[in-house]
Image (spheres, rainbow, N blue to C red):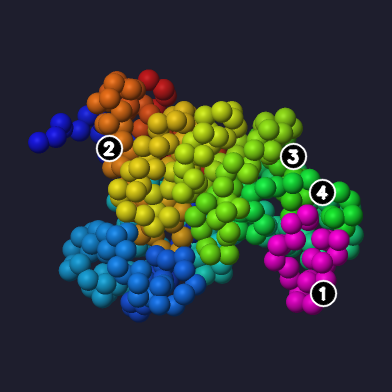
Amino acid sequence: MGAPPVVDLTDVAVVDNHCHSVERRQDQRDVAAWRAYFSESPDREAREEVVATTACYRRIVADTAAFHGVEAKEEAVLAARATTDGAALTGRLLRDAHVGGLVVDTGFPDPATALSVPELAAAGGCPAVPLLRLELAFADLVARATTLDGLLDATRAALGDARAQGWHGFKSVVGYRTGLAIERWDADDQAAAFALARAEVEATGAVRLGHKPLLDTLLHVAFAQAAAQELPVQVHVGYGDPDADLRLANPLLLRAVLEEPAYRGMPLVLLHGCWPYVREGAYLAAVYGNAWLDLSYGIPYLSRGEMRRVTRAALGAAPAGRLLASSDGARIPELHWTGAHDARRLLAQALDELVADGDLDPDQARRTGEQVLRDNAWALYDLASAPTSAPEPEPDR
């Protein structure tokens, strides 16, 4: 028999540093539609059939069935969860998982169909703070701009008082759009990209910013504003929708941003554990004072064994003070729920190994778990100032 666990984190409230809201309606009964929540694939067969054979999906069906006290079959789970409304179901799951805070990317899902950030906070009985999705804000500004100089001025003005507007950070999905090699462009390139974006607005009434010289330029404006306000900026890295070219989503491509002296006041949070580039992300968190590594235990849709390997790799290289836990849960609350439970479980297992190897003593391991699960995110995103308050974390021991 193996040695008994040394590190127990079951009492630590998890601050989910990277998540989205959930849909108001949670009465799904269609199995194929339910399966699609657990896949990033655009392929119908992969999304509605093949996903049911993944380790992640099978685990979540079994776990949710146990939570509801029903048979571990999809139809039984869907019937059980459909007996209550979305807010009530969300509250039950968040409270069961002892979620102590939520940092919410408001860019997805559609706010018209989702719980608001205050509603999400009320459901979970914990503070929740919003992040501004930069690409959506940029698109609105481009749609109203008539000149490039006017757009840049409007962007500075819109982001210049972000804290006063209630934002606790920014979020960028440039990794989906044009890749993480964010460059500086000359005036001609910027003007040409702006003209293309404006032509898209004129033709369709909106714009999806895939115009690299323009998007990069606007991100530099946003980064300067974030640094001035010491606002964290989350960046999608690695695994995601298939419109992200994974070759361009390596966090090492962010070196120029991290090397920029003017941006030292901007904490840059590398999302999804950078999977599969977790060691690259851990390296950046170890050598750059403003780089943080997010460990996501909901999305990517991984087995527990793979999530444990990600956790080991992060703890093996990155400082504990630069690691954060999350779920990336969106649309359904089960992802937030399983993410919090798995964060505690897998982090404790990885910390037990560090104790066994002599890297940490039990007290140091416990303190590391508290930092990663709760304290780092609580401080980074200023959750203490959220309208719905919760007990502040205990001071460092």
Residue at the location (64% across, 38% down)?
A: 255
Question: In the rendered structure, which disc, 3 or 4, sits on the residue that comes first in sequence?
Answer: 4
Give the SS element for disc 1: helix
Front residue (pair 21, 267): 267
The amino acid beneath tag 1 is: Glu
Residue at the location (39% across, 57% down)?
A: 301
The amino acid beneath tag 3 is: Ala
Q: Is 198 left or right of 119, judged from the image as shown?
A: right
Magenta highlight range: 192-214
Question: In the rendered structure, which disc, 2 or 4, sits on the residue that comes first in sequence?
Answer: 4
Query: Distance from label 3 to label 4 (Cα)?
Result: 16 Å
Q: In which quarter of the image is the N terminus?
A: top left
Residue 205 in magenta stretch: yes
Residue 9: quarter of image? top left
Magenta stretch mostly in which secondary structure?
A: helix
Residue 281 in magenta stretch: no
Give the SS element for disc 3: helix
Residue 61, image x, y percentages: 27, 64
Query: Distance from label 1 to label 2 (Cα)?
Result: 55 Å
Is residue 166 placed above or below 107 in the rendered structure? above
Q: Is 333 left or right of 219, judged from the image as shown?
A: left
Seen as rendered, the residue at the extreme left is: 1
Front residue (pair 163, 198): 198
Question: In the rendered structure, which disc, 1 or 3, sits on the residue that comes first in sequence?
Answer: 1
Q: Name the residue under label 3.
A: 224
Q: Name the residue under label 1.
A: 202
Q: Mark 2 points at which residue?
A: 349
Q: Is 177 left or right of 276, judged from the image as shown?
A: right
Question: In the rendered structure, which disc, 1 or 4, sits on the residue that comes first in sequence?
Answer: 4
Cβ atoms at labels 3 and 2 below 8 Å apart:
no
Q: Viewer-nearest of labels 3 and 4?
A: 4
Q: Name the residue under label 4.
A: 185
